[in-house]
Image (spheres, grey):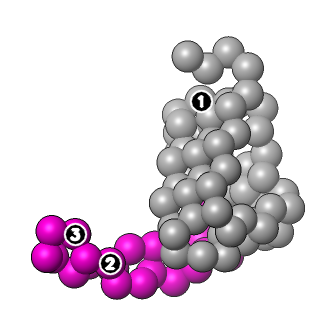
């Protein structure tokens, strides 16, 4: 999403079963939202900001366009016809 113009929080170190890894915001883009980078770039505006490394964003639906969003937490967007 950062390559598409969104501002993303940097990764923090997190430990899982004794293994330390960088962990940043989690973003899940359903294929109904966009399948290619060009589609993502056309639907994600520069006003999108995921502020914290622990934030989670899930987007489903062809009619969704992200233009102005400041996310500090979790957000699930599901729009029509997605199963």
* Res. 16 mark: 3
Between the residue at mark 3 and the residue at mark 2, the CA separation in whole angstroms equals 7 Å
Position of the C terminus, as image quadrant, is top right
**Secondary structure found at label 1:** loop
Task: Give left or right: position of 42 versus 33.
Answer: right
Task: Give left or right: position of 64 versus 33.
Answer: right
Position of the N terminus, as image quadrant, is bottom right
**57 in relation to 50, above or below:** above
**Secondary structure found at label 2:** strand
Which residue: 38% across, 74% down?
23
Which residue: 51% across, 69% down?
54
Which residue: 13% across, 76% down?
18
Q: Is residue 46 visible?
A: yes
Q: Considering only order in the chain, which callout, 1 or 3, is on the residue closer to the N terminus?
A: 3
**Secondary structure found at label 3:** strand
Q: Which residue is mark 2?
A: 14
Between the residue at mark 1 and the residue at mark 2, the CA separation in whole angstroms equals 31 Å
For residue 13, which quarter of the picture? bottom left
Q: Considering only order in the chain, which callout, 2 or 1, is on the residue closer to the N terminus?
A: 2
Magenta residue check for 26: no
For residue 52, which quarter of the picture? bottom right
Q: Nearer the viewer, mark 3 or mark 1?
A: 3
Task: Give left or right: position of 71 versus 9.
Answer: right
Q: Which residue is mark 1?
A: 32
- Residue sitting farthest toward the front: 17
Q: Nearer the viewer, mark 1 or mark 2?
A: 2
Magenta residue check for 22: yes
Q: What is the magenta range?
A: 1-24
């Amino acid at each position: 999403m950062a390559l598409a113009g969104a501002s993303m929080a940097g990764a923090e170190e997190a430990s899982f079963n004794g293994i330390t890894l960088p962990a940043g915001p989690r973003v899940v883009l359903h294929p109904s939202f966009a399948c290619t980078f060009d589609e993502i770039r056309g639907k994600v505006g520069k006003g999108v900001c995921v502020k914290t490394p622990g934030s989670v964003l899930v987007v489903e639906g062809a009619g969704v366009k992200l233009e102005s969003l400041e996310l500090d937490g979790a957000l699930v967007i599901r729009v029509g016809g997605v199963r």
